[in-house]
């Protein structure tokens, strides 16, 4: 019996940056991403959520190799795409694409839409100019753009149309995985639903898989199959959409969900206010990074970093949850003899 191989698998991804601490201070390390692992199945959406600075956009850059990881592994259909191999690198460029947050900044203002869309084909395929034009116009129609848009410049479009152009550019090489980094956060509320529905339709029609990076949990609830909650470079909770939204366990996840607006009064949660500021990644707290803001923190949380534990395919890194489930091992205190 053959072993199942996920479409995309990340194991222990880390990204550290060296920064100057001051004029006479030694170099310091910022652990932007500190050991994140996940699997993405074909046709599914993994949503990565958390506050600004949690490392979710860094994760997107590593998956597309815009930046190389400090440590860790990335596999596409079981193939190591971090290998210094031209074939592996070409495979990664074609099969894993990204849509950036700001459609106003991600498109070259000096190029026409047709040239922007054809550029990936020009670099990666032997297609002739007429073939490239035909492919570009077919993708434009798929994302709701008209033929006459082909010869226009980006500044002539609205924000929603520009994001459609960005999505079309990502589809030009027939990718299987799309990294969507806050793809609707820069758009008007009235346009967000249109772009989200477009992405879901494309997923159904083309069999796309998404890594959807967002801080907006109401958007995530609409599109995700699985959710990974990050805090200060680490995953603190991961599970299916139903597990995260209907039964959040980590105090940080509970606080995030309590702040999500709900139209239905019966669906509203008691507001949990987070006290204190997000810790500096230059000087993270000892133990659990969330300990200073957590309403359930106790002494052990200030000395030891919790590991992700599997509770019926629901991953949680929290000593308070371990206590609730009877899996917390109380440390043995040494006897003091005088």
Image: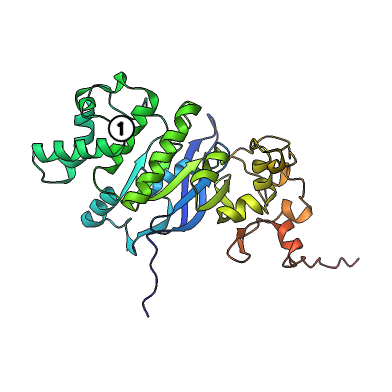
Please name the residue shown 8% across and 41% down the image.
128
Question: Circle 1 is placed at which residue position?
Answer: 165
> Residue 116 at x, y = what percent?
23, 31
316 in relation to 15, above or below: below
| Residue 59 visible in the picture | no
Q: Quadrant of residue 195?
A: top left
Please name the residue shown 23% across and 22% down the image.
152
| Direction from residue 141 to residue 222 in the image, left or right | right
Q: Quadrant of residue 311?
A: bottom right
Going by the picture, which residue comes out furthest to the right?
338
Q: Residues within 10 Å of mark 1 (few under 14, many from 20)?
A: many
| Residue 117 visible in the picture | yes
Residues 291 and 160: in front is 160
> Residue 174 at x, y = what percent?
26, 48
Please name the residue shown 26% across and 56% down the image.
88
| Direction from residue 262 to residue 194 in the image, left or right | left
132 in relation to 160, above or below: below
Going by the picture, which residue comes out furthest to the top?
156
Task: Give the quarter of the figure containing the N terminus.
Answer: bottom left
> Residue 142 at x, y = what percent?
28, 39
Please name the residue shown 23% across and 28% down the image.
113
Residues 221 and 87: in front is 221
Residues 158 and 239: in front is 158
Residues 277 and 337: in front is 277
| Direction from residue 109 to residue 187 in the image, left or right | right
């Amino acid at each position: 019996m053959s072993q199942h191989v996920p479409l995309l698998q990340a194991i222990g991804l880390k990204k550290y940056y060296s920064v100057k601490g001051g004029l006479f201070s030694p170099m310091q390390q910022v652990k932007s991403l500190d050991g994140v692992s996940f699997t993405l199945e074909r046709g599914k959406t993994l949503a990565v959520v958390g506050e600004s600075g949690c490392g979710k956009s860094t994760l997107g850059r590593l998956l597309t190799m815009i930046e190389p990881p400090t440590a860790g592994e990335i596999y596409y259909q079981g193939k190591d795409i971090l290998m210094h191999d031209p074939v592996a690198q070409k495979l990664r460029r074609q099969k894993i694409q990204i849509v950036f947050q700001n459609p106003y900044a991600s498109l070259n203002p000096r190029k026409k839409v047709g040239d922007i869309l054809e550029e990936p084909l020009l670099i990666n395929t032997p297609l002739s100019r007429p073939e490239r034009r035909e492919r570009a116009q077919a993708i434009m129609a798929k994302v709701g753009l008209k033929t006459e848009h082909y010869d226009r410049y980006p500044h002539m479009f609205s924000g929603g149309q520009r994001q459609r152009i960005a999505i079309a550019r990502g589809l030009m090489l027939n990718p299987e995985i799309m990294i969507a980094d806050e793809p609707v956060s820069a758009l008007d509320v009235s346009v967000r639903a249109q772009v989200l529905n477009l992405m879901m339709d494309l997923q159904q029609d083309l069999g796309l898989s998404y890594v959807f990076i967002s801080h907006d949990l109401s958007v995530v609830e609409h599109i995700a199959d699985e959710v990974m909650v990050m805090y200060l470079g680490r995953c603190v909770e991961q599970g299916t959409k139903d597990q995260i939204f209907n039964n959040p366990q980590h105090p940080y996840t509970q606080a995030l969900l309590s702040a999500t607006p709900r139209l239905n009064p019966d669906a509203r949660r008691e507001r949990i206010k987070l006290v204190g500021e997000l810790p500096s990644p230059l000087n993270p707290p000892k133990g659990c990074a969330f300990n200073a803001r957590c309403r359930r923190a106790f002494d052990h949380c200030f000395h030891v970093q919790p590991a992700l534990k599997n509770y019926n395919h629901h991953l949680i890194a929290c000593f308070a949850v371990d206590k609730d489930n009877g899996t917390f091992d109380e440390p043995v205190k040494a006897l003091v003899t005088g």
